Image: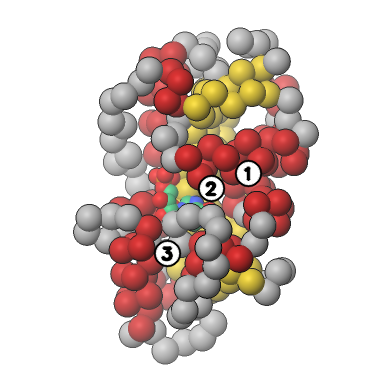
């Protein structure tokens, strides 16, 4: 079976990708970054999701020589001119999901307009051992709610309201989130382009 290294140490992302691969019928095993022995830091200093996804995928591709995918993702809030965007993981000083979410809600307190429209973005960059790259992008539209709700997921999920299910992402089951999420949509596009990997079975 095709083996693909996921260039991320985020356990939530790993399990979401595994769920998405299964739901989209992608016949590939996802190898966690932790299994590769890589323990360096990857600087995510690009100004676009594409740029950061490429840095992560290329670094791990050079290290492993394997087929690698990396995603860079984040939340873009219209009333904040697209912030936190590529800075989503380190929006608050000290970082952490709770601190990031609290900062987001604090910033939005000053914003009178409702609804507070936003979207999650996920760009996946795939790199083959021969250096060829491919990108897919998924976006999921929603709104930011003032009061966090739900226990599932990670990051900003408790404050991201999904119109289709009339619940926050943190109130969805894994399957429901994968069916509407930015990561799920990007994975669906990846599923359509699996031919990209055809000449580089590993
Ligand atoms: P990355 O690991 O550099 O791509 O940063 C992604 C950050 O965006 C995470 O740390 C979260 O703050 C946020 N994020 C990305 N995807 C999701 C999601 O599915 N739910 C909630 N937050 C997310």
Query: Which quadrant would the C terminus be assigned to in this image?
Result: top right
Residue 93 located left or right of residue 18: left
Examine the rendering and report whether any part of residue 144 can be seen: no
- In three-dimensional space, the C-alpha distance between marks 3 and 1, rounded to whole angstroms, equals 20 Å
- Which tag is nearer the camera, tag 3 or tag 1? 1
Q: Are marks 2 and 3 in contact (CB under 8 Å)?
A: no
Residue 174 located left or right of residue 101: right
Q: Mark 1 or mark 2, which has the lower sequence index?
A: 2
Query: Which quadrant would the N terminus be assigned to in this image?
Result: top right
Q: Height in image: 195 above or below 157?
A: above
Give the residue displayed 22% in from the left and 55% down from the top. 94
- In three-dimensional space, the C-alpha distance between marks 1 and 2, rounded to whole angstroms, equals 7 Å
- For label 3, the crowd category at 10 Å Cα-Cα, with few meaning under 14, some 14 to 19 and many 20 or more, is some
Residue named by callout 3:
82
Picture disc at residue 122: 2
The reply to whether the residue tagged 2 has its Cβ within 8 angstroms of ligand 1 is yes
Q: Height in image: 112 above or below 65?
A: below
Of 50 and 98, nearer the camera is 98
Give the residue displayed 42% in from the left and 64% down from the top. 82
| Residue 51 picture location, percent across and down | 41, 38
Kindly give the residue lying farthest to the left in the view shown.
Answer: 93
Q: Are marks 3 and 1 in contact (CB under 8 Å)?
A: no
Q: Mark 2 or mark 3, which has the lower sequence index?
A: 3
Residue named by callout 1:
186
Q: Secondary structure at mark 3?
A: loop
């Amino acid at each position: 079976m095709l083996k693909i290294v996921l260039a991320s140490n985020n356990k939530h992302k790993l399990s979401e990708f595994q769920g998405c691969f299964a739901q989209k019928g992608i016949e590939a095993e996802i190898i966690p970054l932790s299994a590769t022995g890589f323990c360096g830091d990857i600087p995510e200093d690009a100004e676009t999701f594409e740029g950061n996804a490429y840095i992560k995928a290329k670094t791990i591709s050079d290290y492993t020589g394997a087929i690698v995918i990396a995603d860079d993702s984040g939340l873009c809030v219209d009333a904040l001119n697209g912030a936190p965007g590529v800075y989503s993981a380190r929006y608050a000083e000290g970082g952490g999901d709770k601190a990031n979410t609290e900062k987001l809600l604090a910033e939005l307190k000053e914003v009178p307009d409702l609804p507070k429209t936003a979207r999650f973005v996920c760009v996946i960059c795939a790199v083959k051992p021969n250096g060829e790259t491919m990108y897919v992008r998924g976006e999921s539209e929603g709104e930011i709610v003032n009061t966090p709700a739900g226990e599932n997921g990670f990051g900003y999920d408790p404050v991201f309201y999904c119109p289709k299910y009339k619940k926050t992402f943190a109130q969805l089951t894994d399957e429901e989130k994968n069916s509407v999420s930015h990561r799920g949509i990007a994975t669906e596009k990846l599923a359509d382009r699996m031919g990209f990997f055809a000449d580089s079975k590993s």
